[in-house]
Amino acid sequence: MKKSTIHKLLLMCIFFTLPKFLSAQSPDNSPEILTQRVSRFSSPFEPWNAFRGELKLKDSEMTFTPKNAKNRGSFLLEYKDLISVKRRCLLIFPNYIVITDKNFAKYKIGTYRRKKIVETINSKI
């Protein structure tokens, strides 16, 4: 085969398969603002029972996805459903956040960048 026909065939393959690859990607309507590795506590007096995972702050919602296989302790909260976000201390360490939603459920999160996380969530509320 000539080089020109090989180039044409290659371009045609790319031209016909590229839209399929682009449509297969899931559209992300809200880009991530902040991603932080955190720990979610069920009780501040039992730090050994923490779910370690990742907190993602987006434009309209925040999600926590734990590293465990069963996704125990995961949550998805929209900013419009939140009442308050407060900084607290875990025993003697100042690295603790309490998030309260409209159903008065409290989510206790331990992190090292709590000031930035609290400012970001308060700006979205």
Image (tube, rainbow, N blue to C red):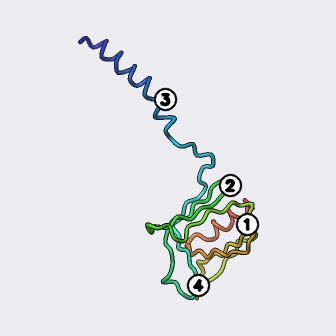
Amino acid type at mark 4: Pro
Q: Give the Cα distance between marks 4 and 3.
A: 50 Å
Q: Give the Cα distance between marks 1 and 2.
A: 12 Å
Q: Position of residue 84 (x, y in %)?
A: 74, 71
Screen quadrant of the N terminus: top left
* Residue furthest front in the image: 70
Which residue is found at the position 61% from the left and 55% from the top? 33
| SS at badge 3 | helix
- Asked whether, in this view, residue 115 is left or right of residue 84, the answer is left
Q: Residues within 10 Å of mark 2 (few under 14, many from 20)?
A: some
State the residue position of label 4.
Answer: 44
| SS at badge 4 | loop
State the residue position of label 2.
Answer: 60
Q: Are marks 1 and 2 in contact (CB under 8 Å)?
A: no
Q: Residues within 10 Å of mark 4 (few under 14, many from 20)?
A: some
Q: Position of residue 18 (x, y in %)?
A: 45, 29
Question: Which numbered disc, 4 or 2, marks the residue that appears first in the sequence?
Answer: 4
Q: Residues within 10 Å of mark 3 (few under 14, many from 20)?
A: few
| SS at badge 2 | loop
Question: Which numbered disc, 1 or 2, marks the residue that appears first in the sequence?
Answer: 2
4 vs 3, front mark: 3
State the residue position of label 1.
Answer: 82
* 87 vs 56: above or below: below
Q: Are marks 4 and 3 in contact (CB under 8 Å)?
A: no
Question: Which numbered disc, 4 or 3, marks the residue that appears first in the sequence?
Answer: 3
Question: Which numbered disc, 1 or 4, marks the residue that appears first in the sequence?
Answer: 4
Amino acid type at mark 1: Leu
Amino acid type at mark 3: Pro
Foreground pick, 30 / 95: 30
Screen quadrant of the C terminus: bottom right
State the residue position of label 3.
Answer: 19
